[in-house]
Image (cartoon, helix red, strand yellow):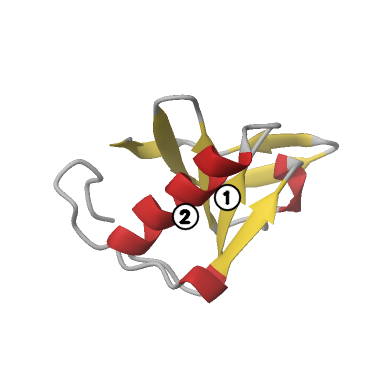
């Protein structure tokens, strides 16, 4: 997995899940652009309003006001998700 700060390509297979807990549309669009800058195809990005929709083993990026937190989903169980952070992408 590549580090996020240098702009390296994000290694993934399948879909990349973008979790937004009610962030404004412009921040969601900026997040998609930042992921695309790291090699994620726009058609591979799935927007989630609930993080439990991300399958185990997938990449999930959580939108925060000033950055994206990129993580790999380890476990989803009974409405909870365990996804250790890999790196941040600053806006």
- The residue at 51%/50% (across/down) is 29
In the rendered structure, the answer to whether residue 79 lies left or right of residue 30 reads right
In the image, 69 versus 67, the foreground residue is 67
In the rendered structure, the answer to whether residue 79 lies left or right of residue 82 reads right
Q: Is residue 17 above or below residue 78?
A: below
Furthest toward the top, the residue is 65
Report if residue 89 is visible in the image. yes
Report if residue 15 is visible in the image. no
Q: Position of residue 64 (x, y in %)?
A: 50, 28
Write down the residue under mark 1: 18
Marks 2 and 1: in contact by CB < 8 Å?
A: yes
Write down the residue under mark 2: 32
Discs 1/2, front: 2
How many residues crowd mark 1 within 10 Å: few (<14), some (14–19), many (20+)?
many
Furthest toward the front, the residue is 26
Q: Position of residue 4 (x, y in %)?
A: 25, 45
Q: Earlier in the sequence, mark 1 or mark 2?
A: 1
- The residue at 75%/45% (across/down) is 52
In the image, 55 versus 5, the foreground residue is 5
The part of the image, by quadrant, that contains residue 21 is top right
Of the numbered discs in the image, which one, if any, rests on residue 30? Answer: none
The part of the image, by quadrant, that contains residue 11 is bottom left
In the rendered structure, the answer to whether residue 14 lies left or right of residue 88 reads right
Quarter occupied by the C terminus:
top left
- The residue at 65%/44% (across/down) is 75
């Amino acid at each position: 997995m590549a580090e996020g700060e240098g702009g390296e390509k994000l290694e993934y297979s399948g879909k990349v899940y973008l979790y937004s807990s009610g962030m404004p549309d412009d921040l969601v669009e900026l997040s998609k652009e930042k992921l695309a800058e790291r090699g994620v195809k726009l058609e591979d990005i799935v927007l989630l309003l609930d993080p439990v929709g991300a399958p185990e083993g997938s990449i999930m990026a959580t939108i925060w006001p000033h950055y994206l937190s990129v993580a790999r989903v380890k476990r989803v169980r009974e409405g909870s998700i365990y996804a250790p952070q890999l790196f941040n992408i600053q806006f």
